[in-house]
Amino acid sequence: MTMHEDDRSREGRVLATELTRRGLVKSAAAATAGAAVFGGAAKFGARSAAAAAPSAAQAAAGEQLFYNYALQNNPLTYDFNSNLYAGAEPEVWAGLLTFDPDGRVVPDWAERWESNEDASVWTFYLRQNNKGWSNGDPVTAHDAVWSLARILNPETNNSYAFILYDVKNGEAFNGGTAKVEDLGLKAIDDWTVEITLEGPRANFPQKIAYTACVFAHRPSVEQHGEKWALGGDIPLVSNGPYKLDLWEQGVKAVHSLNPGYWDAETIRVTKLIDPIIPGDQTALAFESGKGDQQLDWTPVGAADLQRFQGDPNLAPLLKQFVFPGIWMLLPSNGQAPFDKIEVRRALSHAIDRDRLVTVTNGLALPANVMTPVGVYGYFEDPAISEIQKFDPALAMEALKGTEYEGGQNWPEITVLMRSDEGQLNSNLMMNDIAAQLKENLGMDVKINELPEATFRPTLYENTAQLVWIRWWMDYPDADNQYYDMFYGKKASNKRQAWTNDQFDQLVVQAKGELDPEKRLELYKQAEKIIQEDVGYIPVVFRVDQNAFKPWVKELPTNQQGFTVPDGNIYVRGVTRVTTAERPAE
């Protein structure tokens, strides 16, 4: 089925953004065909796309190397199918679909797909007679069904299983109350997958396109268990554009082109090297790294940005990107003193978002709602913006009648956050927020930084008083924010203890609403509920300045003219670039 023209027009009006006013986007591109800045919302029906034609120079280019900004810590595993937070190279994997630089869903191993009339049943048609696994095995519909079921299997303990709760009986199977045979996953034949959902879901292809839904190689998993994706003596069998050749623990990971990947003939970079470099050292590695400890691109944090901008050699290498992500505070685990609504409200009025924009040298935009600027689900509503506006007097007023009136008698307060994200300005912003809380509430806040491997288990305990956390969108739709982040009835792996039945009802209802304007209204109601109860505090949206070496050519660019590197939604940047002009070392 396809969307009617009047639906497209209404969607375009809903998706219109204010980026031009903010000085970050070219208005002409944003207006083209009523497009969103990132992604498409509520579009469903048949989809297909032609493969990009290889360049004329490709055959003669020889070996091309790319030193990728991908690993700030040693990977936990290469098994993204069981652990989205594997921390490895995503270009090694593929699923049914993927995203283009504009956040639109495009074919991967499924060359086309379609839905029934109400978008409750989706059918995916895989590329036939392929040899897509790196050992020469074909990528089949049976691989898709088994891999998607593995994500939901409670024995996998996948923290991202909820991304497939829209699959018929997906949540029940994950919760242990249904069998794998009850899932709405079916291989019609070797090359056709049929997925039945809990109801109409216009955005289901966006979920399937996300990295959390890539496949796993069943024979390897069944033969080797979790060791199948841990490197060492067991070769990793993968199905993405690249395959793993070497994983030198704590140092680097080296990958080469997977000749069986369906689009391999159009890819110029033949060797993909991921040096493992802490986040606060990536700018140095970009500028002066040698051998396998160099980078061909990196985000430039606030600490280095002015130096880059003022250097005539470095400044031309910078390219801006409005990243679809948000930084927020979570005071919502029911831990004192934030178990009191008065304290949570005081906290929400004590943070000057504009000051954080200044502190980060413009690498942020003030956030008053959950969904980032330029993505379906973003809206501006003055009434909602008032709920948690910056107002120190209002913050102190909220404490009247409590034991903390006048900013006194605070207990010891600790905020939990990830470490090794200096290049993303995380420490810089959290330290400034702590200073603001001291200035505006008399509150002393200690900062507890944990590496990813221990941060996430600690987060899921839901016992931290306060959490400073980012949410990089997985797919460009508000469902990813409201449901995936804050749905309160998830059986496990919740980022906060906060729950609200009315909020849950609204975000579930929004999943099945196919009219984009009505759907957006449901999200506005959900936003009002969570902000009034201070289930979270939106702080800033992420803005990047990325530096690319001059020999990295044909960089992916979206409709607005932004250069789009590999990130969270788009993970095929390396397959688009060429480094044929790299100077000899």
Image: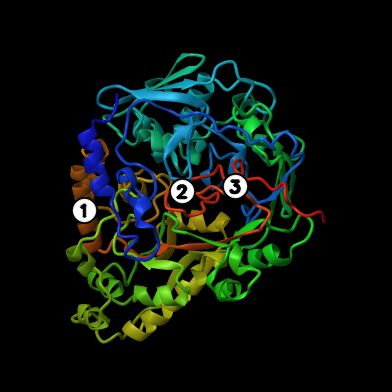
What amino acid is at disc 3? Answer: Glu
Q: Is residue 41 above or below residue 150?
A: below
The residue pinned by badge 2 equals 558
Q: Which residue is painted at 52% across and 14% down in the image?
A: 190
- The residue closer to the viewer here, 584 or 531, is 584
Q: Quadrant of the N terminus?
A: top left
- Alpha carbon distance from label 3 to label 1: 39 Å
Q: Nearer the viewer, mark 3 or mark 1?
A: 3
What amino acid is at disc 1? Answer: Lys
The residue pinned by badge 1 equals 524
Secondary structure beneath disc 1? helix
What amino acid is at disc 2? Answer: Asn
Q: Quadrant of the C terminus?
A: bottom right
What is the number of the mark on residue 236? none
Q: Is residue 49 above or below residue 580?
A: above
Return the disc, 2 or 1, that comes first in the chain's sequence. 1
Return the disc, 3 or 1, that comes first in the chain's sequence. 1
- Residue 335, visible in the rendered structure: yes
Q: Nearer the viewer, mark 2 or mark 1?
A: 2
- Residue 514, visible in the rendered structure: no
Quadrant hosting residue 59: top right
Instruction: Tell whether 534 sits left or right of 156.
Output: left
The residue pinned by badge 3 equals 554
Instruction: Tell whether 159 sits left or right of 574.
Output: left
Q: Which residue is painted at 31% across and 35% down in the image?
A: 43
- Alpha carbon distance from label 3 to label 2: 12 Å
Residue 81: x percent and y percent? 53, 36
Secondary structure beneath disc 3? loop
Residue extending furthest toward the right: 585
Quick one: label 2, few (<14), some, or many (20+) residues within 10 Å?
Answer: some
Residue 353: x percent and y percent? 35, 73
Residue 151: x percent and y percent? 48, 34
